[in-house]
Image (cartoon, coloured by chain):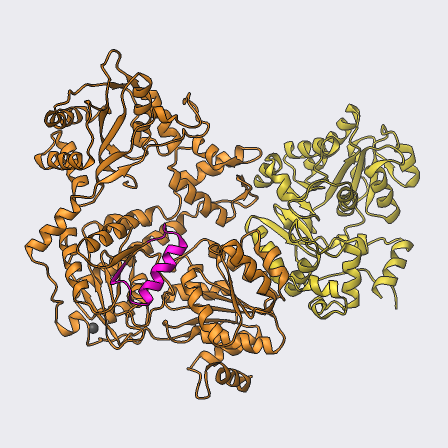
Chain colours: A orange, B yellow
């Protein structure tokens, strides 16, 4: 077979082509129907292995090769590469339009390689529509196979089913797992899951083109100003990694406000928009892409010359993968890690909410167990006190775990036993915390950075690189001056948000006498949000003032500037009452109303024994609670538009109910102004 | 060559290929999976080498055998939800079916709950059956029989339907027994209604069916299912039966004709006399069900000449 494999390599790549150590071995394993694992850095030629194996299998009249890959961006690159080699490659994933999918279905009987996402593999249409049109796959490739392991830095519950799927295939079907980065523990776990007799081919991780640097923790204005200087000094395009969608949007907006061509790239964006940004980045048509980990595994731009982390990433493996996007096809590239005081909290949130808590899982399963005939998500929301986002993620995870199933829009408990995997959840959380700590140590820069990363990834060839900051004793020359820092700070203090009124009451909630659409006459107008939790600006200032009970001059200046910009003329000012912070809100209302020349009038009251709104974990509960607790004060003059103040907004239900009640009692239009958006804050 | 009885041993590739050939993979699938009789014919023709079906001359068989990836997805989804796919090449499959049912042995069973219970050689099983329109007295008889079985540590085999099935199931469970319910609809569909699933999660019931887990009730499914109840039991108790009518009569007559263990009949039942003339024992008190030790545990099948002739032609 070796000769046939070499012939195939020469045919596909060129007359001079030779195999790297390990490649032929992996090809042969796959063609024989064995199982193999390849752990090699990006650029080693993992895809060449399955391209050549595919060519050989097709020569033997065997079926096509199935490639499971978590990310579309990777697939697109691979399909281009396969096509260049003369292999017919197709993809099936959720981003295809109806016409694209039909075209793929029409051509699928000729395909040599099928690239599919785990989600597509498990969809109801994949087997009847796709598999029924092709010969039985002769081999299955699992790209980014570390996702199969909970010890991997990027475990995905959807990969659990892939493991079950591999276990149900006949022994004649070859299986190849590939990953660029995995610790020894992850490799061991993958080997155990892929089965006995597995050939593992593990390479070293050193990246001779990468010049790594770290900077000590700094506040956001300093980092924004530093970033601006850094990006200006670069000749090529690069990636700024941030932790959240909000960070991506704000950092990109900052760079753009300084005249730099920067765009955000996040998981909430449409796939077509993401694809457009990837293409622009590939052609160097942007200066910086500010991305969450959504721009992740597999993105390949060989001439990428820099990657900056605005915040500490999750751990050494994530960091190595992300910074490793740079310098693949160029001799020199820079990787810089900045850190902020907010990083630890954000990671703690990610780590602790990755798996449903035991009470959450038990409550959900108990509700579903009791229900004859299943429950919809809306029914569950009304019955359990779990925030909607966490409920949705718990439903996905428990479905992937197999303890619940979904048929139509209803969820059912299954026959599978559920024992809360406390030990596993705790062990995984502890592992994640250790990984974060490893990066904190890395960021101290006390020893060679590349070596530290390699050691954290269990690479036995690790040694000082001679290029990084600690090795050379050099620092990057981009420290900002006070004027630049001040400019960035002012930017942070001007991030006014819009507040869209809710349009629908929640579905079926006890204690809520209203349902369906909220009439436009009873909704608030579009409102404004001054700041945001942990924004390093007015959001933080507002919460600090609230704690003292006294609105600061700085806060009032912010509100005044916002009102100037908003261009509204309220006839009177009121506030949403609060049991804990009413005095603060009343002072705020007075201070805000005075320059407007508008009267301040208390218009709503709250029951003294009201349960705190923030203990209401999800939307239907919050709506019912707000309805129970609020009432209009009789006899208040309410003509004309009212500026309705509130300290924080989370679910928007308090404002929705308050607006409804005021309108019902004859108030003029409602203009809501909230100091701090605490959505997502713990 | 003498006659031989079907037998099978655990074998992963055969198990996987059996699912591939015998499973209805989706509601939309136009391809009909192999019926039990056809499956065993193919099995014999291939000399047990099921993977060779992929190179068969028969285009439809080739097409069925080329579904291993789809079958693997089907199995992975169900196994992930606690539904076991049993084929004769799985250790938990009740080999008694091969001995008793011959070519009518279902190549694929979907099981929710402890599937090992079906094949456990150390356990005894009493089937309690009866027509749907049983009288109160007949339901009482079914209840006593199931309670007594549970008290003795026997598993109760039932059909999971209303009437005698439900009475027997509840009686066994309330006496701390375990029920094996062979359903006429898919196991997942049945569990979505809640009650049966709760028994499964409490370890008090095992549900099994040869049809797709989401399939609904059909008369055809019910007819094919009845023999699975009799053929799994050491002893069958017929609590209510009407002569010449319905699944209970036909099933009991078949069980007697083919010798699927002993059959006892409630003397109060309408067709008790007719069943007795076919070989059923009248059982006035539940203790009588257990008087003779169960002579048939599937190890030494008492095949009738009809069986032997059939098996000779098919499997020699
Ligand atoms: Zn170094």
Q: Nearer the viewer, residue A240 or B61?
A: A240
Judged from the image, the quadrant occupied by ligand 1 is bottom left
Q: Position of residue B277 (x, y in %)?
A: 93, 38
Residue with the most extreme left position: A482
Q: Position of residue B315 (x, y in %)?
A: 83, 64
Q: Position of residue A38 (x, y in %)?
A: 44, 72
First to last magenta residue range: A266-289
Residue placed at 61% from the left, 39% from the top? B191
Q: Is residue A58 left or right of residue A560?
A: right
The answer to whether residue B204 is seen in the rendering is no
Q: Is residue B143 above or below residue B46?
A: above
Q: Nearer the viewer, residue B51 or B94?
A: B51
The answer to whether residue A584 is seen in the rendering is yes
Q: Nearer the viewer, residue A373 or A329?
A: A329
Q: Position of residue A1 (x, y in %)?
A: 56, 83
Q: Is residue A270 magenta?
A: yes
Q: Is residue B19 left or right of residue A388?
A: right
Residue placed at 49% from the left, 81% from the top? A12
């Amino acid at each position: 077979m070796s000769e046939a494999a070499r012939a195939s390599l020469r045919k596909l790549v060129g007359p001079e082509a030779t195999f790297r150590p390990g490649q032929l071995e992996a090809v042969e394993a796959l063609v024989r129907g064995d199982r193999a694992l390849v752990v090699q850095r990006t650029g080693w030629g993992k895809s060449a292995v399955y391209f050549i194996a595919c060519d050989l299998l097709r020569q033997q009249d065997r079926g096509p090769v199935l490639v499971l890959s978590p990310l579309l961006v990777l697939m697109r690159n691979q399909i281009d590469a396969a096509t260049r080699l003369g292999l017919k490659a197709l993809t099936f994933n959720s981003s295809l339009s109806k016409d694209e999918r039909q075209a793929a279905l029409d051509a699928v009987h000729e395909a040599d390689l099928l690239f599919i996402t785990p989600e597509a593999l498990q969809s109801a249409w994949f087997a009847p529509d796709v598999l029924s049109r092709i010969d039985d796959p002769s081999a299955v490739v699992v790209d980014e196979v570390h996702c199969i392991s909970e010890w991997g830095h990027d475990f995905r519950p959807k990969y659990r089913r892939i493991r079950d799927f591999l276990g149900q295939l006949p022994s004649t079907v070859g299986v190849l797992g590939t990953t660029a980065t995995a610790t020894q523990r992850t490799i061991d776990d993958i080997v155990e899951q892929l089965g006995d007799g597995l050939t593992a081919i593990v390479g070293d991780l050193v990246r001779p083109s990468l010049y790594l640097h770290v900077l000590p923790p700094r506040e956001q204005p300093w980092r924004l100003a530093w970033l601006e200087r850094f990006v200006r000094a670069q000749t090529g395009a690069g990636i700024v990694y941030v932790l959240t969608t909000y960070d991506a949007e704000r950092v990109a907006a900052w760079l753009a406000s300084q005249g730099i061509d920067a765009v955000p790239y996040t998981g909430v964006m449409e796939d077509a928009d993401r694809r457009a940004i990837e293409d622009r980045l590939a052609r160097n048509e942007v200066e910086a892409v500010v991305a969450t980990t959504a721009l992740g595994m597999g993105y390949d731009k060989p001439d990428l010359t820099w990657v900056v982390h605005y915040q500490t990433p999750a751990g050494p493996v994530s960091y190595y993968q992300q910074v490793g996007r740079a310098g693949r096809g160029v001799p020199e590239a820079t990787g810089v890690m900045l850190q902020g005081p907010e990083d630890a909290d954000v990671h703690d949130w990610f780590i602790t909410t990755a798996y449903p808590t035991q009470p959450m899982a038990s409550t959900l399963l108990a509700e579903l167990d009791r229900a004859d005939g299943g429950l919809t998500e809306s029914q569950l929301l009304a019955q359990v006190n779990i925030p909607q986002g966490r409920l949705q993620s718990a439903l996905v995870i428990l479905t992937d775990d197999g303890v619940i199933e979904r048929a139509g829009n209803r969820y059912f408990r299954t026959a599978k036993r559920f024992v809360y995997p406390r030990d596993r959840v705790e062990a995984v959380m502890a592992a994640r915390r250790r990984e974060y700590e490893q990066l904190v140590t890395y960021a101290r820069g006390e020893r060679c950075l590349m070596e530290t990363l390699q050691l954290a990834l269990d690479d036995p060839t690790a040694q000082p690189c001679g290029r990084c900051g600690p090795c050379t004793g050099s620092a990057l020359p981009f420290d900002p001056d006070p004027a630049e820092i001040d400019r960035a700070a002012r930017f942070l203090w001007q991030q006014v948000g819009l507040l869209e009124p809710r349009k629908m009451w929640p579905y079926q909630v006890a204690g809520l006498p209203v349902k369906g659409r909220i009439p436009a006459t009873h909704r608030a107008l579009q409102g404004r949000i001054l700041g945001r939790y942990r924004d390093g600006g007015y959001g933080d200032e507002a919460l600090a003032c609230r704690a003292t009970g006294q609105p600061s001059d700085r806060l009032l200046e912010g509100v005044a500037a916002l009102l100037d910009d908003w261009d509204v003329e309220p006839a009177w000012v009121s506030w949403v009452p609060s049991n804990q912070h009413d005095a603060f809100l009343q002072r705020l209302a007075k201070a805000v109303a005075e320059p407007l020349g508008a009267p301040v009038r208390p218009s709503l009251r709250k029951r003294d024994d009201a349960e705190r709104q923030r203990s209401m974990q999800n939307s239907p509960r919050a709506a019912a609670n707000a309805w129970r607790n609020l009432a209009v004060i009789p006899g208040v003059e309410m003509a004309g538009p009212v500026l309705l103040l509130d300290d924080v907004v989370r679910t928007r239900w308090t404002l929705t109910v308050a607006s409804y009640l005021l309108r019902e009692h004859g108030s003029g239009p409602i203009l809501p102004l909230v100091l701090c958006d605490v959505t997502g804050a713990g | 060559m003498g006659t031989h009885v079907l037998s099978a041993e655990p074998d992963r590739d055969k198990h996987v290929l059996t699912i591939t050939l015998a499973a209805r993979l989706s509601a939309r699938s136009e391809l009909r999976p192999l019926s039990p009789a056809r499956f065993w014919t193919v099995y014999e023709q291939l000399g047990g080498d099921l993977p060779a079906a992929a190179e068969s001359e028969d285009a439809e068989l080739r097409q069925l055998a080329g579904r291993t990836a789809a079958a693997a997805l089907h199995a992975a989804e169900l196994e992930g939800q606690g539904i076991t796919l049993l084929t004769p090449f799985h250790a938990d499959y009740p080999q008694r079916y091969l001995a008793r049912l011959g070519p009518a042995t279902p190549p694929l069973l979907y099981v929710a709950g402890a599937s090992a219970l079906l094949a456990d050689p150390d356990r005894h099983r009493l089937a309690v059956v009866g027509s749907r329109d049983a009288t109160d007295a007949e339901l009482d008889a079914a209840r006593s029989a199931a309670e007594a079985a549970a008290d003795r540590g026997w598993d109760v085999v039932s059909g999971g339907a209303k009437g005698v099935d439900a009475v027997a199931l509840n009686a066994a469970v309330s006496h701390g027994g375990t029920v094996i319910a062979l359903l006429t609809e898919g196991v997942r569909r049945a569990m979505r209604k809640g009650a049966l699933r709760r028994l499964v999660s409490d370890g008090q019931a095992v549900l099994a069916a040869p049809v797709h887990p989401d399939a609904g009730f059909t008369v055809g499914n019910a007819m094919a299912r009845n023999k699975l109840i009799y053929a799994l039991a050491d002893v069958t108790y017929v609590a209510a039966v009407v002569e010449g009518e319905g699944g209970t009569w036909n099933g009991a007559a078949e069980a007697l004709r083919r010798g699927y263990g002993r059959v006892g009949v409630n003397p109060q039942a309408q067709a008790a006399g007719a069943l007795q003339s076919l070989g059923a024992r009248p059982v006035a008190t539940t203790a009588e069900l257990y008087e003779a030790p169960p002579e048939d545990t599937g190890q030494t099948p008492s095949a009738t000449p009809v069986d032997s002739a059939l098996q000779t032609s098919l499997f020699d």
